[in-house]
Image: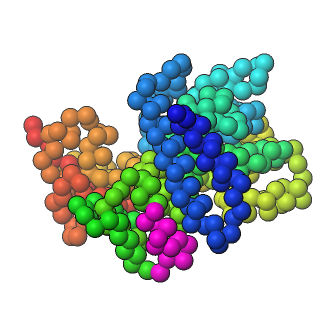
Amino acid sequence: MATIEEQIKEIQDEIDRTQKNKATMHHLGKLKAKISKLRDDAEKRRSSGGATGRSYAVKKSGNATVGLVGFPSVGKSTLLIKITEAKSEVAAYEFTTLDVIPGVLDYRGAKIQVLDMPGMVKGAATGRGRGREILSVIRGLDLILLFLDVNNIHWEVLEKELYAAGVRLNGRPPDINLSKRNRGGIEIHPTLELTKIDIELAADIVREYGYINADVVIREDVTEDQLIDFLSGNRVYIPAFIILNKIDMTDSAHLTKLKRRLKGWKVVPISADGEIGLDELKEEIYNTLEFISVFMKPQGKPADMEEPMVVKAGSTVGMICDIIHRDFRRRFRYATVWGRSAKFPGQTVSIEHELADGDVLTIVVKR
């Protein structure tokens, strides 16, 4: 019996051989679903079998974690040293980082963990160059910084490896809901006209993932790849932008040409070595992470309006409890909020209440 890897290769070969046109779209869609399901199964087997060899264990800290992701020898380690207090361990004979090196960027009241990742190579998603270990760290990031230099801007190689590992850059989960039922087969219920996938193919893709009876509600005009992503359930959606390094080694005409090639991407040009553009980079990191400020008010005392607590947008009262003290969530009684997230000043809220920028918060705990 063929192994999962052999089955994947056989299906991929068939996809490559098949001419892509309207008549073959349905067949290719089913093949895509088959190969995606097999890859998911292979990954589950690897995970359940336990990791072998070294792995990168990185303890997350600070308000958010961002990663410098790029090819070997592009200057990631230099940048980390310039914007944080970290000292990156570099192998002189290969000019590449040996491990994941963390540093902390202090900026506008936020503590942002920055990880210098080992250089990524083509084939990383299949394990080449310890790619699986690197990608497992990347999947847990809050922001990916695709680090290129002016002599090598092949971002599509990095994006392809990330995509194969289930990382979707600057995307969001598709608006789809699936409910199992006891009988009746697969029913697709779009709430709008589907122009990128037909109902029959959508139902066949759902079947490929082992569902026999289910209602599937599709609330946006999704592609077959987005439907497959939803059914896989293991995709991560991470914001990203491009850092273009070594701009002091080229002229303005060539830099303009490079930016045209990177059209559609947010690009921050820098020179890590020459310390050019680093302030702009810090500001872009801060803005992309969407931080908010929350002012703490001790019970019966004035609020501290000088030093806010900086947290990510979407943070709840419970998340603030976790930051203040490990026992605060367990001992939580109630909280009081003034500001944009409150229906009225001084509203009493629960631990699940989502905060807004500029809120004033009092947390009351059991003694």
In the image, is 46 to the left or to the right of 69? left
Name the image quarter holding residue 239.
bottom right
Which residue is depicted at the point 12% across and 47% down?
Answer: 333
Q: Nearer the viewer, residue 194 or 245?
A: 194
User: Does residue 295 appear left or right of residue 258 in this picture?
Assistant: left
Q: Whole-percent x and y of residue 338?
A: 25, 62
- Given residues 113 and 128, the one toward you in this image is 128
* Magenta highlight range: 193-204
Q: Quadrant of residue 28?
A: bottom right
Classify residue 204 as left or right of residue 309.
right
| Residue at the image point whose x is 55% and y is 48% from the top | 35
Residue 339 seen anywhere in this rendered image of the structure: no
Q: How is the image coloured?
A: rainbow
Q: Is residue 278 part of the magenta span, yes or no?
A: no
Where does residue 261 sit, x and y in percent of width and height? 79, 59
Residue 6 percent coordinates (x, y): 59, 37
Q: Quadrant of the C terminus?
A: top left
Position in image of residue 79 (x %, y %): 68, 37
Is 323 situated above or below 235? Answer: above
Is 304 placed above or below 222 here?
Answer: above
Residue drawn at (61%, 28%) of the image: 130
Q: Is residue 13 or residue 59 the one in the foreground?
A: 13
